[in-house]
Image (spheres, helix red, strand yellow):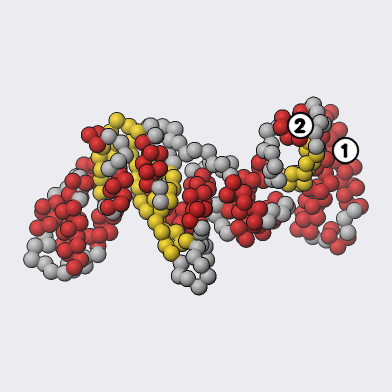
Amino acid sequence: MTPTEIQELNEHLRAVAAILFRNTPEEKRQDFESIERTLREQILTQVTPAIGSFFFEAATGTTAGRVRKVISCLGKVEITERQAEKLELKKNSRLSPLLEKCCLRLVANESFENAEKDIEIMTGMKVSHSSQQRLVQRYEFAETEAKETVDSLSIDGGKVSLRTDLGEQSEWRDYQAIMLHGQVGAGFFQANQELIDWANSQPLAEVITCLGDGHDGIGNILAKIGKSESKREVLDWYHLKENLSKIGGSNARIKQVENYLWSGKIELALAKFEGLEGKEVKNLSAYLNKHRQRIPNYKLYQELGICIGSGGVESTIKRIGLRMKISGAQWKAENVPQYLKLRCAYLNQKIA
């Protein structure tokens, strides 16, 4: 703006402010918060909708078509069909694009009931929890894609509570999350082949490191990602340490076994348990034997900069779970995939 335009604008704003002040009850002018709330309400009902209408007409050069109302961050605005078409506003949408994103960011982190309250406090606009729920269910999230070559990835599983008939115990079902290290993550519910196809559609490096926790289901998925002849399947070091810690007994022995495993010396590690009894020891020995082809020299891998732990995807699972497992949350099975997309889109910084 030029100095002259700024001066002209300020004069008009003072005139507008004077009108708004005269129409503000005295009891709502006694403290800062009251002025904030009242002034915002007046602006959203009397000022910005009118400015918006001017912009819509000036930007499109038309007033043709039936008038529709849209709830927006400018308030409830009116826009004609032709204006909406030129401004790429979705047909039949009651919410503006920016307000939709505000709602999506909230419901990606909290219940719909809380989001209804928070959106009103933050924007001044009322959007019911049922409207926000319908928004999520119909929203078309952009396909998640890696922007750079993927040289390592991890897969892990989480659980979600499914809605059951009244009086019946809730059912817990698994979902899988995949993390392309340093880039993006995605969640899949009862759709292993979809996960595999998605992973293989990404720009995978010629040699790729695939990490898992040793679970058979995860291993079966990893086996179908990338080319077998140029793939490192690595047993997650932190899962390995977690399993080692379960056996109890001598701390010195556990530390010695950990040092052997850190260097990939499986036989020496197994030898430390010879003659020992107990379910935990037997389970660990079976675990090491089963995954010996996935236990490398972790020390060397770390020195070479090769990923040895799926901390990123575990963090992703935990962050996804913060929404999927909020107190009392139960989901219809058919809705779970869409809410996983919502949560992952938020975590991938794709709702902005």
Q: Residue at (84%, 46%) from the top-left corner?
A: 46
Residue 12: mark in rendering: 1
Which one is in front, 210 or 334? 334
How far across and how far down the image is residue 186, in percent? 44, 45
Amino acid type at image mark 2:
Arg
In the displayed structure, does residue 113 sit left or right of residue 229? right
Which one is in front, 47 or 126? 126
Q: Are marks 1 and 2 in contact (CB under 8 Å)?
A: no
Residue 215: mark in rendering: none
Amino acid type at image mark 1:
His
In the displayed structure, does residue 226 sit left or right of residue 120? left
How far across and how far down the image is residue 299, in percent? 22, 45
Secondary element at tag 1 = helix
Which one is in front, 72 or 333? 333
Q: Residue at (84%, 28%) from the top-left corner?
A: 4
Crowding at dot 2, Cα within 10 Å, few <14 / some 14-19 / many 20+, comes out as some
In the displayed structure, does residue 84 sit left or right of residue 229? right
Question: In the rendered image, which quarter contains the N terminus?
Answer: top right
How far across and how far down the image is residue 352, in percent? 58, 41
Residue 82: mark in rendering: 2
How far across and how far down the image is residue 2, in percent? 79, 27
Spatial CA distance of label 1 from label 2 is 30 Å
Confirm whether residue 147 shows in the render: yes
Q: Residue at (22%, 60%) from the top-left corner?
A: 244
Secondary element at tag 2 = helix
Residue 304 position by quadrant: top left
Residue 30 position by quadrant: bottom right
Quick one: label 1 or label 2, which is nearer the N terminus?
A: 1
Q: Residue furthest left?
A: 275
In the rendered view, tell whether residue 130 sits above or below residue 293.
Answer: below
Q: Residue furthest front?
A: 165
